[in-house]
């Protein structure tokens, strides 16, 4: 009888432990909101102005994810590393932005300064075993004129023993006139768009895509997904099949820490008009082991079939 009771108790404990564990923890003074799964931190969204100690104030930035954590609570991203001060964890910026007859950038500080600014929270909810977070931001010239509206939506799924899926949807709409985005034409790299800047542990990491392992950095090459992995853990970025220009071009590096960049729109430009938003969908897959052990290929198949 005692053993039966204990089994029932443990079953109930496991069920309750696997549900309703998601939570939001905000630090308004530091302008950040952390999503937790039980006792573990999953990611922190930095909505307030952020500036690394000792860095020139021109590099102040907001509206990005850092840290992104492993299944065991290890930080996977880097923020304003010395080699690339404009890299901010999981972020989305463009090196060429044309608006109001001006050419500027959200990628690096450039006059006139254009960057994202927090406007308001749209959603902070727990739905089943997922945490839903959405926020409205504005792209502002020199902190004054709004040229675009940005909505960031995150769906953070509970982890299983193998990995965790985090869905990211970006909606960008021009305000008050057209907005043109383009990747850099420098050496035909075409970078810009969604970027994952890995922590130093990803230096020399194994690079894998849907086409197989990469022996060297990929620059402006078409893939459906890309992964950086050590023996212990990895991070993959999946692109939704309804993404503009699918399959997109990529930049993937392991020479300095690690970088995964969905290079969209790449070398060509795209023009947004007011009332015609662009919707960009991705999934970030954090997993144990390398790409094979983490079953990244299967996880992408699950994603494309619309299952969580």
Image (spheres, rainbow, N blue to C red):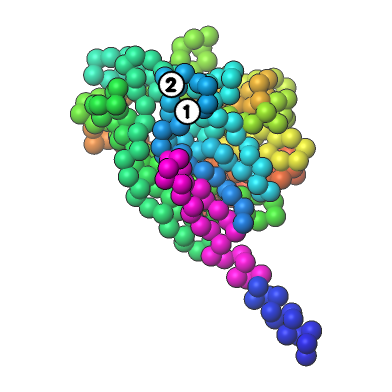
Q: Residues within 10 Å of mark 1 (few under 14, many from 20)?
A: some
Q: Is residue 269 visible?
A: no
Q: Which residues are magenta?
A: 14-38
Q: Quadrant of residue 272?
A: top left
Image location (x, y in percent) of residue 152 = 40, 42
Q: Quadrant of residue 295?
A: top right
Please tell me which residue lies in front, 66 or 60: 60
Please tell me which residue lies in front, 69 or 132: 69
Image location (x, y in percent) of residue 110 = 38, 15
Task: Left or right? Give the position of 190 relative to 71.
Answer: left
Q: For residue 71: magenta?
A: no
Residue found farthest to the bottom? 1
Q: Residues within 10 Å of mark 2 (few under 14, many from 20)?
A: few
Numbered badge on residue 220: none
Q: Which residue is mark 1?
A: 51
Under circle 2, the secondary element is helix
Label 1–label 2 contact, CB within 8 A: yes
Please tell me which residue lies in front, 256 or 281: 256
Which of the two labelled residues, at mark 1 and mark 2, occupies the earlier sequence position? 1
Q: For the C terminus, give its image quadrant.
A: bottom right
Q: Which residue is mark 2?
A: 57
Residue found farthest to the left? 176
Instruction: Tell me if residue 194 comes above or below residue 57 in the rendering.
Output: below
Point 77% across, 37% down: residue: 231
Image location (x, y in percent) of residue 42 = 57, 48
Under circle 1, the secondary element is loop
């Amino acid at each position: 009888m005692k053993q039966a009771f204990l089994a029932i108790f443990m079953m109930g404990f496991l069920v309750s432990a696997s549900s309703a564990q998601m939570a939001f923890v905000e630090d308004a003074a530091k302008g950040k909101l952390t999503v937790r799964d039980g006792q573990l931190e999953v990611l922190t969204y930095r909505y307030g102005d952020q500036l690394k100690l000792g860095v020139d104030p021109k590099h102040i930035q907001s509206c990005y994810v850092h840290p992104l954590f492993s299944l065991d609570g290890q930080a996977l991203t880097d923020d304003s590393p010395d080699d690339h001060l404009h890299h901010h964890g999981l972020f989305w910026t463009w090196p060429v932005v044309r608006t109001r007859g001006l050419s500027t950038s959200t990628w690096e500080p450039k006059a006139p300064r254009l960057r994202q600014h927090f406007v308001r929270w749209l959603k902070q909810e727990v739905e089943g075993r997922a945490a839903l977070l959405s926020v409205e931001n504005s792209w502002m010239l020199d902190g004054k004129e709004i040229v675009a509206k940005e909505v960031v939506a995150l769906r953070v799924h509970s982890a299983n023993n193998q990995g965790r899926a985090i869905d990211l949807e970006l909606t960008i709409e021009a305000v008050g006139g057209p907005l043109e985005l383009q990747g850099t034409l420098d050496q035909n790299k075409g970078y810009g768009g969604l970027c994952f800047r890995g922590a130093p542990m990803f230096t020399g990491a194994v690079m894998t895509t849907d086409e197989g392992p990469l022996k060297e950095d990929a620059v402006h090459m078409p893939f459906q997904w890309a992964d950086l992995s050590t023996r212990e853990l990895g991070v993959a970025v999946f692109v939704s099949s309804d993404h503009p220009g699918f399959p997109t071009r990529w930049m993937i590096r392991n020479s300095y820490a690690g970088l995964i960049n969905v290079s969209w729109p790449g070398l060509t430009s795209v023009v947004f008009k007011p009332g015609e938003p662009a919707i960009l969908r991705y999934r970030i897959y954090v997993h144990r082991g390398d790409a094979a052990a983490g079953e990244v290929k299967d996880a992408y198949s699950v994603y494309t079939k619309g299952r969580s």
